[in-house]
Image (cartoon, rainbow, N blue to C red):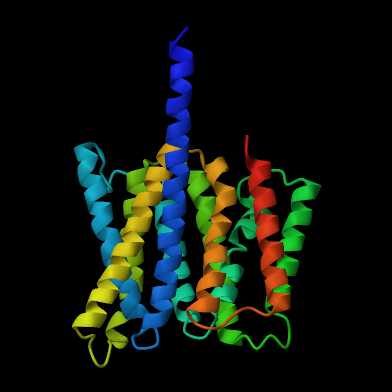
Amino acid sequence: MSAVPASLPAHSAARQTGILLFFAALVAFATFDAGAKQMLERYPAPFLNVMRYLAVVTLAVVMLWRHGRGVRLRDAPEKPLLVLRGVMLATVATCFMTALIWMPLSEATAIYFTAPLIMVALSPWMLGERVRPAQWAAVGAGFAGMLLIVRPGSNLPALGTLLMAVSAISYAIFQVLTRKLSGKVPGPVQYAYTAFICLIVTALPAPFFLPDPWPGLADTLIIVSLGACSGLAQILLIAAFQRVSAATLAPLNYFQLLLAVGFSTFWFQRPPDALALAGIGLIMASGVFLALRRAP
């Protein structure tokens, strides 16, 4: 009889650890975004993206090595979907990083966080899932929030807004493809395919956007640290999902949006106005509602 109560604290401890790891990952992601926006004042977006994915590829190689010879990229099933998934995330990285040149961090991140709403809207056609009226209402409320952010008179740059919208749509497709591949392709293979494709795609324009002048020692250390921060975020995310279900963690994602608002306000002195804040609130509420509806 003592085995059952003894296991409950252990499970609770693992859950708490997973949630803390997830929050740490979100902090790392938000820190990378803010640091990248700062570096974009001096260096081209393709160059910073390549530096980021060099770190992610290094992590992917370590993951494949740890899983041994049983994991082979060339023998992976569903190769077309794996390649498309990688291209979608590379599109996200390219559009997001470029948009940050002109967009305030808070508004840019809020538009990006409409991706879960887009995924729900796409799921009847791409996954054959039923979307209930309450979920459609949440999707509509979230998009209304986005319209409050990009409304006429908001002074957001049209090109940056368009790039962020493309980024959100691409990430929604990436999420749908991830669900389609779930259970069919091992996680390390999915991760490695995505890492290598993102590095290749983001490196294609890099020779045409070399930094001038080249980063000095201090900036080089900052850029390398940002790449390490992105890689660390991936490690923390994987560790969190090993301990806690995705359904439990999904509503917590919007903590990153709060961090983006904080960074934008106090680091870049670009706080969102009242209507934009209302739009951000609508997007967060809609996303959390949809995430909770998916929870078992």
Foreground of the two, 201 or 157: 157
* 188 relative to 141, above or below: above
Residue 83 location (% of width, % of height): 40, 57
Residue 137 location (% of width, % of height): 79, 55
Residue 145 location (% of width, % of height): 72, 68
Foreground of the two, 167 or 85: 167
Q: Residue at x 64, y 60 (%)?
A: 118
* Residue 215 relative to residue 157: left or right: left
Q: Spot the residue most to the bottom.
A: 213
Q: Residue at x 29, y 63 (%)?
A: 228
Q: Quadrant of the C terminus?
A: top right
* Residue 203 relative to residue 293: left or right: left
Q: How many marks?
A: 0
Foreground of the two, 278 or 192: 278
Q: Is residue 128 visible?
A: no
Residue 200 location (% of width, % of height): 31, 68
Where is residue 197, by image quadrant?
Answer: bottom left
Where is residue 248, by image quadrant?
Answer: top right
* Residue 142 relative to residue 1: left or right: right
Q: Residue at x 46, y 28 (%)?
A: 11
* 206 relative to 15, above or below: below
Q: Is residue 31 visible?
A: yes
Where is residue 185, by image quadrant?
Answer: top left
Q: Residue at x 37, y 50 (%)?
A: 236
* 127 relative to 231, above or below: above
